[in-house]
Image (cartoon, rainbow, N blue to C red):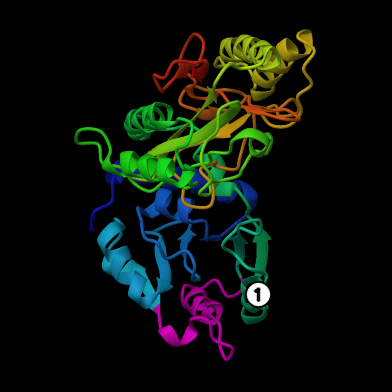
């Protein structure tokens, strides 16, 4: 059996597949079709910028998984997946963006060849990469099969990281530190935002020592002033100005693993309301970190943070974080548990979250966040070594 250039050992992939198969059996699924590129990579090692066309992994209850996709990308699968070559299949280019045929017709033929024409087949219904058209064609082609919703089935198996994965995230965190230092050092009045972002990208891809940088799943988020009242704006060519706060939501990336971090810089003298909010936010972050202990729940982290804000008269709703690890665009979150008041997920050692207690106010935003590891004992460990404060520059 081939190991190819997959980043982990065969034992690590065996562990992942065993966990996924146990979840499949519990859900009554005989064959799983995985389209999320993060889940594909987690199971097989596949790594390529090809998720704009139909592709996926077929996993039964025994044997090696099968990677399926466009023929030209099957070459890349052979270079990155651990499976033997006969478990990599490519469809012809005549299927790509055709009005006459659809790639799911080719996939259905493979599924029939595997003997699952009447099987219970799980598909990731709530997924960026699995279209309504794809599902309709697959259902028509496999009219005697049962297509079951397997959304996030694999995602939940990824929640507790192996030691090897944690090692990759720690490497990503070293890059994050460099990226954030670059942003904070370069930020100054008159600097065009696109020039700053160019430096951020350069720092992230260059990496640190022998830790090379991969592309992050989310581009740098760098809004200033009123734009910083919104969570997910990017950049333009406007010069930075005195009297404005700019938050940086950034992540280094190493072999698709991330360690997101947010810090805020204020150019000039911050108003008292910003300083008061900073104090409340930092106190709340510390309370959340203390609550982020094995055996507690994700809601305990959120409630600890929100409780401190309420004491200071600040209203905050919504999620305060999510699990992270291996990801592809458009998101570095794993889309399983959430750090929010209604989520009862029990924290276990090896879970890694982007703890994201940001504040978006009427005229400014203040983002200070951490990538945290749930440990065997004690409070969570922040993985990035960047001072936790509002950075002020004259």
Say if the magenta span includes residue 92: yes
- Magenta stretch encompasses residue 250: no
Looking at the image, can residue 387 be seen? yes
Image x and y of residue 199, in percent:
36, 41
Which of the 4 quarters of the picture holds residue 264? top right
Q: Is 376 situated left or right of 125 in this image?
A: left
Residue at the bottom extreme of this rendering: 100
Regarding residue 254, the answer to whether it shows in the image is: no
Q: Quadrant of the N terminus?
A: bottom left
The mark tally for this picture is 1
> Measured from the top left, where is residue 27 in percent x and y?
64, 50
Give the magenta part as a residue range: 91-118
Q: Is residue 14 above or below residue 366?
A: below
Residue plotted at (60% across, 15% down): 285
Whole-percent x, y for residue 35 in the image: 52, 61
* Residue matched to label 1: 133
Identified at 55% across, 77% down, the residue is 104
User: Which quarter of the picture shows residue 318?
Assistant: top right
188 displayed left or right of 241: left
* Nearer to me, 329 or 282: 282
Residue reaching furthest left? 210
The residue positioned 72% from the left and 30% from the top of the image is 363
The structure residue drawn at horizontal position 63% and vertical position 52%, both measured from the top left corner, is 151
Q: Is residue 337 left or right of residue 97?
A: right
Q: Is label 1 in a helix, a strand or a loop?
A: helix
């Amino acid at each position: 059996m081939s190991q190819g250039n997959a980043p982990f050992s065969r034992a690590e992939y065996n562990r992942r597949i065993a966990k996924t198969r146990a979840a499949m059996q519990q859900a009554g699924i005989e064959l799983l079709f995985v389209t999320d590129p993060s889940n594909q990579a987690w199971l097989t090692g596949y790594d390529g910028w090809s998720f704009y066309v139909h592709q996926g992994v077929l996993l039964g209850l025994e044997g090696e998984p099968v990677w399926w996709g466009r023929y030209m990308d099957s070459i890349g699968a052979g270079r990155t997946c651990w499976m033997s070559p006969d478990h990599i299949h490519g469809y012809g280019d005549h299927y790509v963006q055709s009005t006459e045929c659809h790639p799911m017709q080719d996939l259905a033929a493979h599924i029939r060849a595997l003997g699952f024409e009447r099987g219970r087949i799980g598909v990731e219904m709530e997924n960026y990469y699995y279209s309504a058209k794809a599902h309709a064609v697959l259902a028509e082609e496999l009219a005697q099969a049962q297509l079951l919703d397997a959304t996030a089935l694999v995602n939940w198996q990824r929640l507790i990281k192996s030691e090897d994965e944690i090692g990759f995230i720690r490497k990503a965190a070293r890059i994050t530190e460099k990226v954030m230092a670059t942003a904070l050092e370069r930020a100054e009045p008159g600097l065009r935002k696109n020039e700053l972002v160019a430096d951020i990208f350069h720092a992230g891809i260059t990496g640190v020592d022998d830790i090379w940088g991969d592309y992050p799943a989310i581009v740098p988020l760098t809004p200033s002033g009123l734009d910083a009242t919104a969570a997910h704006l990017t950049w333009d060519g406007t010069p930075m100005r005195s009297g404005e706060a700019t938050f940086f939501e950034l992540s280094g990336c190493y072999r698709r693993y991330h360690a997101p971090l947010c810090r805020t810089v204020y150019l000039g003298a911050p108003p008292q309301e910003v300083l008061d909010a900073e104090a409340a936010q930092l106190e709340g972050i510390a309370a959340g970190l203390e609550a982020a202990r094995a055996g507690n729940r994700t809601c305990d982290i959120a409630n600890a943070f929100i409780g401190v804000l309420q004491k200071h008269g600040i209203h905050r709703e919504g999620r305060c974080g999510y699990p992270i690890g291996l990801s592809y665009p458009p998101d570095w979150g794993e889309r399983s548990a959430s750090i929010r008041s209604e989520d009862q997920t029990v924290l276990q050692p090896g879970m890694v979250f982007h703890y994201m207690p940001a504040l978006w106010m009427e005229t400014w935003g203040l983002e200070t966040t951490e990538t945290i590891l749930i440990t065997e004992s004690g409070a969570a460990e922040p993985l990035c070594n960047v001072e936790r404060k509002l950075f002020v520059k004259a």
